[in-house]
Amino acid sequence: MAGPLALQFLRSASSSDQLPDALVEVALVGRSNVGKSSLLNALANRTNLARTSKTPGATRLLNVFELDGKPSGRWVVDLPGYGFAKVSGAERASWQQMIEGYLTGRPNLQVVLLLVDAEIGPTPLDVQTVDWLRHVGRPVRIVATKADKVGASRRGGRRAQLAAGLGLTPNDVAWCSAEKGFGIPELRTEVAGLLTPT
């Protein structure tokens, strides 16, 4: 298993046009309040690498984190959440343009980690996002977050139900909890392999 990812905050941008080229990128995508920032902190084993908030919509820009704290060109990019953040319609439209521009315009984007709340399951917006990513040809890896909220007796059935809602098998879903730490070492290893391909 890989150790904590040595990620350092690099920069924020309101458009992918503001970002230089990178060697390899992994993107974190999901609805507001699904736990993207918490997961990023857990992958790096840090409490304050990415800003977390109880209020949906804390992430409002493309936030770039670079592996190894030097100009390695190996990035994890945290995107604004979609869904129920309390912002104006104009700002929500701006976010959508920012997100779609990034996801369609980055040639070295290896995979999109799409985070889905394990307890709630895939929402219609999650399903729509997965379908859209497949349509534009982006590889998608589903990560079920907040899995500690699902009781052990329900976990197997919940995992099968969540996967089926996205047209996948249970083994296609990474099941993890940033708060309790389970599933994080395996996901670290997976992300490290994506950022440092042989």
Image (spheres, helix red, strand yellow):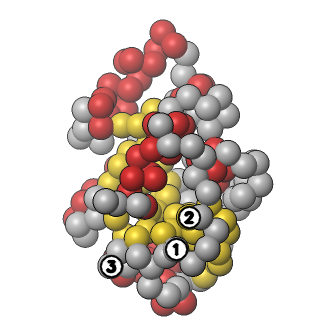
Instruction: Give the image location of residue 30, x and y in percent.
Output: 50, 54
Mark nearer the viewer, 1 or 3: 1
Instruction: Give the image location of residue 150, x and y in percent.
Output: 54, 22
Say whether residue 107 is visible. Answer: yes
Instruction: Give the image location of residue 112, x and y in percent.
Output: 39, 59
Question: Dot 1: what SS?
Answer: loop
Q: Farthest front residue?
A: 198
Question: Dot 2: what SS?
Answer: strand
Residue at 62% x, 57% y: name it: 6
- Which callout, 2 or 3, points at the residue further toward the start of the chain? 2
**Do the CB atoms of the residues marked 2 and 1 lie less than 8 Å apart?**
yes
For label 3, count other residues whose C-alpha is less than 10 Å away and answer few (under 14), some (14-19) or many (20+).
Answer: few
166 in relation to 104, above or below: above
Of the numbered discs in the image, which one, if any, rests on residue 72?
1
- Which callout, 1 or 3, points at the residue further toward the start of the chain? 1
- Which callout, 2 or 1, points at the residue further toward the start of the chain? 2
Instruction: Please tell me in which quadrant of the rendered image residue 105 appears.
Output: bottom left
Amino acid marked by disc 1: Ser
Residue at 72% x, 58% y: name it: 49
Which residue carries the number 2 mark? 67
Which residue carries the number 3 mark? 107
Give the camera-side residue of 182 and 51: 182
73 in relation to 4, above or below: below
